[in-house]
Image (spheres, grey):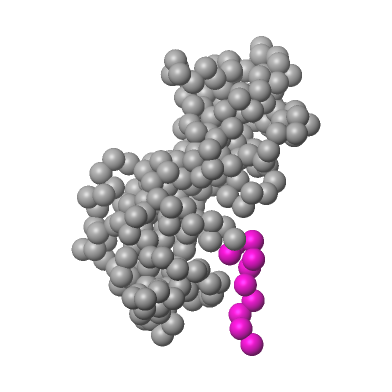
Amino acid sequence: MGAIIDTTKKRVERAYLELARAWYPAFPSGVLVDNEAPDFLMATPEGQFGFEVTQLFQQSSNSLFAPKEVESFREWVICRAEEIYSLSGAPPVDVNAYFSVRSLARQRKEKLAQAFSDFVRANYPEDGQVLNFQEGNPNSALPSGLGAVSIARPLLGGSRRWFAGGVGETKLLTYDLLAESISFKNPRVAGYRTRASNVWLLVAVDMFPFSASFSVPLGVDTWSFDYEFDQVLLLSRQESKVWALSSA
């Protein structure tokens, strides 16, 4: 009897692979078939391909949480903005909201929630892309009280997911974290080759949720890694881009 497949996780993995197919010209052509070890198989004229997919998450830190009253304000605004958005009948959307460093105590919560909801509706993104808006950018016109906002269509086309955070919670992807992720998967390649002659690894970094929120540094295409895969790809939803990572 085959292994039980987590269908929700599998749908997310497939969504990342489909984005990689759209953004990476050298991605092989064929039908992706659900599998375990590796996650997907694809029959092509060049042989059987296997794809393993992994999403990076932030490592735990010892940083302190924001004061309780600030957290309460953020959560009220994000929940109320999401409610207003939902009642408007607008399509599903993922939202990360970073609140301004300015004092929030004097701001009117209902007014900010309404303005926030209106802003998201006015900036609904194209399929597969993430729109990023930053406080102080004259082209962003963020409602007062918000420091940064990222908006995207949900990967699964499902329910809305709105997240509230502070300032600077999107971390810069590091070489060590990426290398650790690849190294963790390396010992499995030999087993994968019993199912596929060409085995690829896709590492996905996203903006949603905060625990998976990364930005990719300049120069990532100059990094090289020790791996047994035939190809390792790095996908970033924020940049709507895929990098082929070099082998050491």
Does any portion of residue 145 appear in the rendered image? yes
**Front-lying residue, 114 or 102:** 114
Magenta stretch bounds: 1-10
Magenta span dominant secondary structure: loop
Q: Is residue 34 above or below residue 104?
A: below
Residue occupying the point 66% across, 14% down:
107
- The single residue placed furthest to the top in the displayed view is 106
Q: Quadrant of residue 44?
A: bottom left
- Taking the magenta stretch, the answer to whether it contains residue 5 is yes
Rendered location of residue 93, percent (x, y) = 63, 39
**Front-lying residue, 105 or 24:** 24
| Number of marks in the rendered image | 0
Rendered location of residue 100, percent (x, y) = 54, 21
- The single residue placed furthest to the front in the displayed view is 45
Residue occupying the point 32% across, 41% down:
217
Q: Is residue 137 above or below residue 161?
A: above
Residue occupying the point 24% across, 63% down:
247
Q: Quadrant of residue 46?
A: bottom left
Q: Is residue 246 above or below residue 122?
A: below
Quarter of the image with the N terminus in it: bottom right
Residue occupying the point 53% across, 60% down:
13
Rendered location of residue 112, percent (x, y) = 67, 19
**Front-lying residue, 59 or 91:** 91
